[in-house]
Every structure is written in structure tokens, then in C-alpha cells.
Image (cartoon, grey):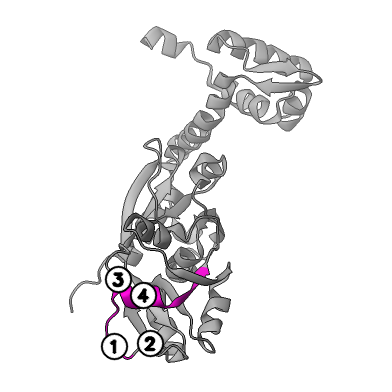
Amino acid sequence: MSKAQFRNIDLNLLIPLKALLHERNVTRAAERIHLSQSAMSRALDRLRSEFGDELLVRVGPNYELTPRGSELIDELAQVMPRLARLWAGETFSPAQSEGHIRLAMNDYATSVVLAPLAEICGRLAPGITLEAVPWHERFHEESGLVTTHLILSPLSVPSTFRVEPLFEDIFVCVLGRKLKHRKTSLTMKDYLSFRHISVETQPNQQSLIDRPLGEAGFQRRLAVHLPYFLAAIRMLETTDLALTIPARIAAPVAALHDLVSLKAPKEIPPIRYSMVWHPRFESDPLHMWLRETVRQIFRPAPPL
């Protein structure tokens, strides 16, 4: 864009543009920003001319966004807060923020991350609220990632998203109280002789265990399928079943219930979690603070 073209940009059109794209209706958009309907219609005509695109097209009784219009919603979400900060000159203050943070995690990641994150927010950013929603393998393919600040995923995601490795954990087999196993280690033969509990909080999640076993030519005996970790843990107190879970939650479970836990066979590889976010959040001050705070949870403490 040349300097002459830049000088011709009317920033006053950004407000009606945002209203039109969100409302998809000239009358409602005009009411939203307190303009007359005729003024909003003129603004739409100018915007169509400036962008060389219809932006809104009639489909039956309603209006729908063109592909360019849909792109502009995401672009405005990044540009307008930056313009506001440019004029205000304010720096982000966690203590004064009243933001809402939405995270997508499975049951395990929630138990590992949410408690320390809530503690930090309560101490440094009491006005921030946290919301955790269920994660599943195809979460990144849904529009939810556009409105979700951060997901914690053990699987790879498309390169269009920002990804940062976060932590690694190994799988541990917690033995039911009635399961007699006197060895201090666990061979694959031992592991396959057990009857197992499969915790499937989301479809295909348990494949993190069964998929590598299958690739190595093994298949374990699944006695119980259920979606709840707490119920699975309670089941261990009275049965001879085995539960394979990451070590970060296996250790406190085994200690609390006085159960034996052994490292799973080497054919079950470690689980590696990354934090994933949509590029629209890359420069958002609240999101930058969130990412650094999550990093600190897994950063080794300095030596005394």
C-alpha cells in the first residue's frame, strides 16, 4: 500500500464495519452504534467500494458474509484492540484485568494445570475468570479454537496454529488392591495378563495407550470402559483390575489409596503435551500473560 493510499483510509469506517459483520443486518448494525439506517447504508456502500467486495450478500431473507467478510472479522479482532491500546497507551496489568480465559483440556490436563493456574490468578489477577471445556482430538478443526484462548493437546495440530511444547509425562500402571503382583517391575507379559480399566473421557482418547500397543503387535484385555477418572480410581480399591494413567496423577492416587504403581512397559511411550492457540491471540496482552504463566507452572524451580 502506497503512502497516498494509506492517507485515504478512513478509520471511522472500522466501527460500522465491525457492527455490520457481527450483526449481518443494516438495521441492527445501525442501532448497535447509534447511526441512522441511511447512514449505515452509505457506510456499507463505501466499505464495499474500499474493499472491492460485497462483504454481505442476501441469502433468502437473511444476509451472509462473503469469504472476505469472514476474514475481516478475525482481522478486526486483532486490529481494533491494538488501535485502542495505541491511543490509550496503557500497559497490561494482571491485577486490574477482568478478562475471561477459556481453556480446552482433557481430564488429566485439567488436573495438572488448572489448580496451579487458579492459584496464580487468585493471587496476581483476581479479576480474571477461568473456564475449562472438554478437549478432543478434532477440537482444532472446529470454530471453538477461535474463541478458546488455549488448548492443551497431546497430539500434533496443523501448522496454521501456534504450538509450544509444554511438558512430558510417562504412563504408570496402578494395580487394584486385589491384584496380586509381587514383582517391583512390570514386563509386557505381566501387563497383558492383567484385566484393565479404560478411561475414555473423549472418543479415541484411550488410543494414546492402545494405539502404540497395537503398532507393537499387542492388545490388552479391557474389562471396564468408563468416562470418569474418579470412578476408575474407586474401582481399584475393591477389584483386581489395573489402570494405566500418567505419572503426575498416578503418584498421588497410589499414595492416597495405598495402591501399588509400576512404570508401564516401554512399548507405551511418554505423553507429550503442548499448548496450542489461534494466531489471532498472538499479540494479545492477556494471552501473552497467560502463556507465560502456564510456562512458569512447568518451569523447574531454581536451586536453593
Q: CA distance from mark 4 to mark 2?
A: 14 Å
Residue identified by numbered label 3: 265
Q: Which mark is residue 191?
A: 4
Q: Which residues are magenta?
A: 182-198
Question: Relative to the observer, which residue lies in front, 272 or 47?
Answer: 272
Residue identified by numbered label 2: 260
Q: Are marks 1 and 4 in contact (CB under 8 Å)?
A: no
Q: Which mark is residue 218?
A: none
Query: How many marks are shown on the rendered structure?
Result: 4
Q: CA distance from mark 2 to mark 1?
A: 10 Å
Badge 1 crowding class, 10 Å Cα cut-off, few under 14, some 14 to 19, many 20 or more, is: few
Q: Residue at x 61, y 28 (%)?
A: 18
Q: CA distance from mark 3 to mark 2?
A: 15 Å
Residue identified by numbered label 1: 183
Badge 2 crowding class, 10 Å Cα cut-off, few under 14, some 14 to 19, many 20 or more, is: many
Badge 3 crowding class, 10 Å Cα cut-off, few under 14, some 14 to 19, many 20 or more, is: some
Membership of 190 in magenta stretch: yes
* Residue 122 position in % (x across, y down): 49, 69
Q: Circle 3 — which element?
A: loop
Question: Relative to the observer, which residue lies in front, 26 or 212?
Answer: 212
Q: Amino acid at mark 1?
A: Lys
Side of 265 where 160 appears, left or right = right
Q: Residue at x 41, y 80 (%)?
A: 174
Question: Relative to the observer, which residue lies in front, 194 or 86?
Answer: 194
Of the two numbered discs 2 and 1 in the rendering, the one whose residue sits closer to the viewer:
1
* Residue 112 position in % (x across, y down): 42, 69
Q: Circle 1 — which element?
A: loop
Q: Are marks 3 and 4 in contact (CB under 8 Å)?
A: yes
